[in-house]
Image (cartoon, rainbow, N blue to C red):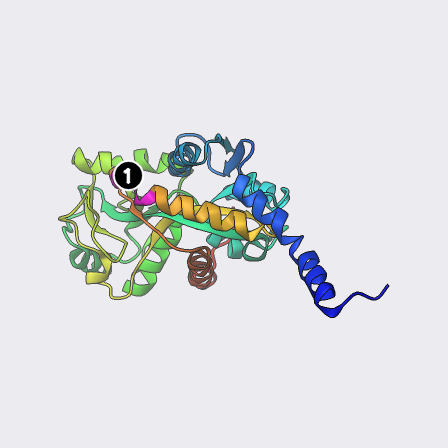
C-alpha cells in the first residue's frame, strides 16, 4: 500500500519523536528513587560538609533522598572511578573537587576525568589562607617575602600532603615570588600540630579548617588566596595585591557519569543553582568561608578544564610526584 506523502511525513515525524519523549518524561519524573552522592575524602572533611549541605537541599527540593557515600582513599580517585563506572542514569553523582583537577596530572589513572565525568553544577569556592606561626616576624605578604629572601632555605613550607591543594598553592607562591622555601608534607590534619608547635613556619591552609586557630590568635593570617577578600576575614588582604596574578582556591561541584541524559543534568543544574541562591544556604556557606559558584554545566566544565591545565603546569614545573 502506498501512503499519501502528507501521511507518510506525519508518521515519520512521529516516529522520530518517540525516543525523545520517554527521555523527557524520565527527566520530569526524576528522581524516582534515592540518589547516591559519592565524595572522596571521608566524613567530617570540607567535601563531606558541602556534600551534605547540597544533598539536604536537593532532597527537600526534589522529594527524594540524596544519600552521601564517603569513599575515601587514593586522593579521591577511588570515589571518582566508582562514579565513572556507574550507570549513567542520574542516580550516582560525584562531588567534584579541586583534587580531581590535580589528579589528572599527578596520577596515571584508569580513566580520563574530563572525558568520563559530565559536569553538572558548581557549588562553592573556598579560599586558602596564607598563615604563619607567630614567631615569624612578618605581618604582611611583602614583609614575608623580604624575610624569606633574607633567609633562603631556612623557612619550612607546610602542606597537608604531596600533591594536595595546600601543596600546589604553596609551590605556585614560591615560584611567583621567587623564594627558596623547604616543603614539609604532613598527612592531612596532622599539619596543624606541627604548625602550632613552630616546626613549620608558613602554610597555605583551607580557610574552613584554619579559621578557629586564626580567631584564637594561634596563627597569623597574612592573606587569602582568592581574588577577592573573604567575608569572614574582611580585614585580611588577598595575595594578588602583592603578587599580581596569584589565585588559588578549593572549589566543589557535582558531576555524573558521561552519557547521563542531558535533561537530567539540566534539571540537577537548575535545582543546584536554586539551592545556592537561597540566602539561608549562602549564609551556611559563608560560615565556612565559601562563596557560591553559580553557573551552567558548560561553565563548570570550563572551570574544570582551566584548573586542570593551570595546576598541571605547576605540578610539572615543581616536579611533584605522588607519594
Number of dots carrying numbers: 1
Q: Residue at x 27, y 39 (%)?
A: 210
Seen in the picture, residue 58 relative to 125 is either above or below; the reply is above
Q: Is residue 197 visible?
A: no
Image quadrant in which the N terminus is located: bottom right
What's the magenta region?
276-286
| Classed neighbour count for the residue bearing mark 1: other residues with Cα under 10 Å, few (<14), some (14–19), many (≥20) | many
Q: Which SS does the magenta portion mostly show?
A: helix
Seen in the picture, residue 296 relative to 231 is either above or below; the reply is below
Task: Say left or right for 242 vs 322.
Answer: left
Task: Verify whether residue 292 appears in magenta.
Answer: no
Between 105 and 23, the one lying in front of the other is 23
Q: Quadrant of residue 175?
A: bottom left
Q: Residue at x 33, y 44 (%)?
A: 276
Name the residue tied to disc 1. 288
Furthest residue toward right: 1
Instruction: Pinpoint residue 169: horizontal percent, then vertical percent.
Output: 35, 54
Q: Residue at x 16, y 57 (%)?
A: 143
Amino acid at each position: 500500500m502506498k501512503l499519501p506523502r502528507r501521511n507518510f511525513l506525519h508518521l515519520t515525524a512521529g516516529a522520530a519523536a518517540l525516543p525523545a519523549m520517554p527521555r523527557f518524561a524520565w527527566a520530569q519524573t526524576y528522581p524516582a528513587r534515592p540518589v547516591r552522592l559519592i565524595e572522596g575524602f571521608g566524613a567530617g572533611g570540607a567535601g563531606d560538609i558541602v556534600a551534605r549541605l547540597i544533598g539536604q537541599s536537593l532532597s527537600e527540593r526534589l522529594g527524594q533522598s540524596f544519600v552521601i557515600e564517603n569513599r575515601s582513599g587514593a586522593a579521591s580517585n577511588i570515589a571518582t572511578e566508582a562514579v565513572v563506572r556507574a550507570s549513567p542514569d542520574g542516580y550516582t553523582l560525584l562531588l567534584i573537587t579541586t583534587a580531581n583537577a590535580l589528579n589528572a596530572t599527578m596520577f596515571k589513572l584508569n580513566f580520563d576525568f574530563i572525558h568520563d565525568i559530565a559536569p553538572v553544577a558548581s557549588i562553592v569556592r573556598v579560599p586558602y589562607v596564607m598563615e604563619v606561626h607567630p614567631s615569624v616576624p612578618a605581618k604582611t605578604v611583602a614583609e614575608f617575602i623580604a624575610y624569606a629572601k633574607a633567609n633562603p632555605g631556612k623557612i619550612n613550607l607546610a602542606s597537608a600532603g604531596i600533591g594536595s591543594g595546600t601543596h600546589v598553592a604553596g609551590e605556585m607562591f614560591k615560584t611567583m615570588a621567587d623564594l627558596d622555601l623547604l616543603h614539609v608534607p604532613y598527612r592531612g590534619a596532622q599539619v596543624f600540630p606541627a604548625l602550632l608547635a613552630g616546626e613549620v613556619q608558613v602554610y597555605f591552609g583551607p580557610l574552613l579548617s584554619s579559621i578557629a586557630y586564626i580567631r584564637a590568635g594561634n596563627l597569623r593570617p597574612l592573606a587569602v588566596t582568592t581574588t577577592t577578600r573573604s567575608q569572614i576575614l574582611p580585614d585580611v588582604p588577598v595575595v594578588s595585591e602583592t603578587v599580581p596574578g596569584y589565585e588559588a582556591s578549593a572549589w566543589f561541584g557535582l558531576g555524573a557519569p558521561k552519557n547521563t541524559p542531558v535533561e537530567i543534568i539540566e534539571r540537577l543544574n537548575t535545582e543546584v543553582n536554586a539551592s545556592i541562591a537561597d540566602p539561608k544556604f549562602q549564609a551556611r556557606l559563608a560560615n565556612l568561608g565559601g562563596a557560591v559558584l553559580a553557573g551552567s554545566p558548560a561553565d563548570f566544565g570550563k572551570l574544570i578544564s582551566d584548573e586542570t591545565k593551570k595546576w598541571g603546569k605547576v605540578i610539572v614545573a615543581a616536579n611533584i610526584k605522588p607519594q
